[in-house]
Amino acid sequence: MSPLQITDPEIFSLIEQEKARQENRLELIASENFTSRAVMEAQGSILTNKYAEGYPGKRYYGGCANVDVVEDIARNRAKNLFNVEHVNVQPHSGTQANMSVYFTVMQPGDSYMGMDLAHGGHLSMGHPKNFSGKIYNVIPYSVRRSDHLIDYNQVRELAIKHRPKMIIVGASAYPRIIHYDIFSEIASEVGAVLMADIAHIAGLVVAGLHPSPAPYADFVTTTTHKTLRGPRGGIVMCKRQYGSALDSCIFPGMQGGPLMHVIAAKAVAFQEAGGKDFHDYQSRIVSNAKALAAELMNRGFSLVSGGTDNHLALVDLTPKGVTGAQAQEILEKAGITVNKNSIPFDPLPPGKASGIRIGTPAVTTRKMGASEMKTIAELIDRAIAGRHDENKLLQIKNQVQEICHKYPLYGKNGSVNE
Ligand code: DSN
């Protein structure tokens, strides 16, 4: 028996149940992935015992010799990977990474522009119930109704009209390439700081499959656990001139002790992302997303923007007569995990939503390919069409399990070996 099993059988059992859920279901949440054993080993290590407030060489605690090296390695690997001048690896999450940039650049009451959450943006880009919408004056920009692409003309017009202190470019549900060069031109035109949030597409950026914002943006934030396939956490990158202001904003400004075990795991993930297989993995994420999107469209699903250039597709379920919330529940019964998602100009509230967001990073980690994507689209279609028949949903769930058994996650032949 493991120590956890002996000390806390209840939590042990829930972790085992969650392991079985991850192993036996198709994970299509675009922001989720499965980390390597090496990342998990670092994250589950004794580094969790160490306090290290401050930065390498300037800590408030003794005994930091080893963790200083760990943090230096993490920072240098991220710098090389993303080709940036300064990195802070201490933010505990993507939202805290974004918060640290806002606190570095703006004062309460200042204005900034961010992508409307209802059009693919993120909670931390100005939602009225989030700090980002409460402390600052937010000017949201959106996608065009005609093609669902970012309306760069609107961005420019709003920027000229409002003269924001900062412009944020980044999204959590946008299936197309983002043109940082255009955002950079607009930001310079109005004297705004440019921040890019690449949380979703960080892996694609590293692999060169999506343009990098690094040459254009003053700040770049990302989480480390999505396409990048690292531990759950955030980092901030910036031009050298902002480095020391950013660092003091994160500590002592916003956070106390850094999570050194997570920083070690980030370092491991950065090394993996610099490895020879990573480009191939990211290419397969994109080709799988395109294959899944194409087969869904063949089957009468409507896709926001008509397809995808990246790791996700946003499916408008209106033609199928179900809401996003209903589809999420139906697919859950069929063994397929997705999240309901608003579509641009959605007539429904976010709790119901007209769409679902589907992504391929996790199934690609399992080594599934184009033929499985075709089958997954078929299963989604059959589940939604057969939603009133519990037997049909059960049959699909069994088929999902067969696919999952063919591409195991954990165990000897799994893509995440034990
Ligand atoms: N909530 C995450 C997502 O699912 O996109 C972003 O932080």
Image (cartoon, rainbow, N blue to C red):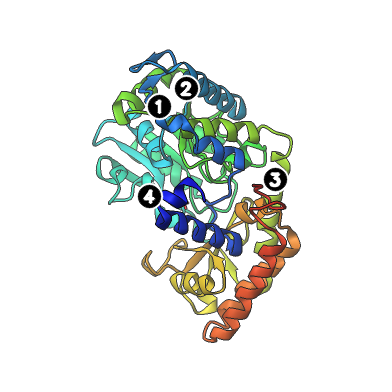
Q: Which of the pair 258/286 is nearer the observer?
A: 258
Sooner in the amino-acid sequence: mark 3 or mark 1: 1
* For the residues bearing labels 3 and 1, Cβ distance under 8 angstroms: no
For numbered disc 2, what is the local secondary structure?
helix
For numbered disc 3, what is the local secondary structure?
helix
For numbered disc 4, what is the local secondary structure?
helix
Residue 123's disc is 4
* Neighbourhood count class around disc 4 (C-alpha, 10 Å): few under 14, some 14–19, many 20 upward: many
Whether residue 220 is visible, yes or no, is: no
Residue 67's disc is 2
* For the residues bearing labels 1 and 2, Cβ distance under 8 angstroms: yes
For numbered disc 1, what is the local secondary structure?
loop
Q: Examine the rendered structure and indicate whether residue 247 appears above or below residue 168.
A: above
Sooner in the amino-acid sequence: mark 1 or mark 4: 1
Q: Which of the pair 42/164 is nearer the observer?
A: 42
Q: Is mark 3 within 8 Å of ligand 1?
A: no
Sooner in the amino-acid sequence: mark 3 or mark 4: 4
Sooner in the amino-acid sequence: mark 2 or mark 4: 2
Q: Which of the pair 6/400 is nearer the observer?
A: 6
User: In the image, what residue type sits under mark 4?
Assistant: Leu
Q: Which mark is in front, 3 or 1?
A: 1
Q: Examine the rendered structure and indicate whether residue 239 appears above or below residue 44.
A: above
The image shows residue 116 at horizontal and vertical percentages of 40, 51
Q: Whole-Å distance between the Cαs marked 3 and 1?
A: 34 Å
Q: Which residue is mark 3?
A: 281
